[in-house]
Image: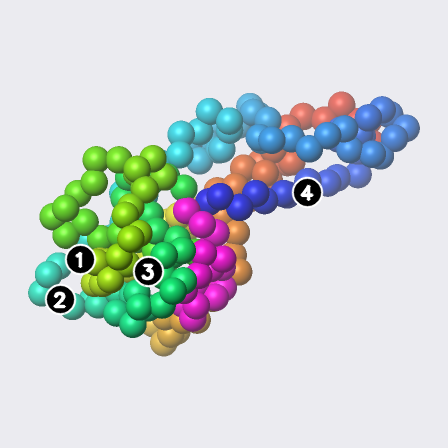
Amino acid sequence: NNRTRYYMVAERSNRFSNSSDSHQPTNIKTNIPPINYPSEDFITSATVVKPLSNYIQQFSDDDGKEQQYIIPDHVFDKEWAKDLPIVCELDNITHCFTAGYGRQIHRATGSLLLIANGNERSHPVAEDPIDRTDMSAYKGKLRRFTENELLGLFGFPSSFQFPKNLSLDHRYKLIGNSVNVKVISSLLRYLLFQPSTDSRL
């Protein structure tokens, strides 16, 4: 997503210091350094960010399950509707999804998905912005991301499941308070498997 996050990796060594007798960090790294640890999930500066279409759930026209995620019509009559954070399946970046995603509709809580409904776009919204002149034109065409779509975006394995008695709002809250599993996994592998020259280890 488009919110910058900083992670602190620490250990009792001089690996991240300016010198052997200094414990001040050298700098803030903008990517995770490569390590000699084979893994398809390890994130590096060469990792390609996939478009949202890789995570989007397809609904059947008859099951009605998509309806619970559709943005209510009255939202589009609000003055602030022109500022709704909208993306489509071709985009590969979203606004940060937070714990309030299921309760509030705002760019500070996460993006909304533009439903194609046979009108597929040829370019991402980031490259070809939508027409926001009349937001009522998007009634029935915007929805929240499903909890399973968000789990995929956050790097959770497809085998992960919430307890069935957990409400949708509660699921959104838990996901919004989470972090990307693949990023944390890559950071831990860098910390644990990157060789250190410190004699104290």
Element assignment for label 1:
loop
Q: Residue at x 64, y 43 (%)?
A: 7
Mark 2 highlights which residue?
Answer: 63
Is the residue under label 1 in contact with that under label 2 (CB below 8 Å)? yes
Element assignment for label 4:
loop
Is the residue under label 2 in contact with that under label 3 (CB below 8 Å)? no
Frontmost of labels 3 and 1 is: 3
Mark 4 highlights which residue?
Answer: 8
Q: Residues within 10 Å of mark 3 (few under 14, many from 20)?
A: many
If the image is split into quadrants, where does the C terminus sit?
A: top right
Q: Nearer the viewer, residue 123 or 190?
A: 123
Q: Is residue 44 left or right of residue 9?
A: left
Q: Nearer the viewer, residue 137 or 165?
A: 137
Mark 3 highlights which residue?
Answer: 144
Q: Is residue 157 visible?
A: no
Residue 108 sits inside the magenta stretch = yes
The mark nearer the N terminus, 4 or 1, is: 4
The mark nearer the N terminus, 4 or 2, is: 4
Mark 1 highlights which residue?
Answer: 59
Q: Nearer the viewer, residue 67 or 187?
A: 67
Q: Is residue 104 above or below residue 115?
A: below
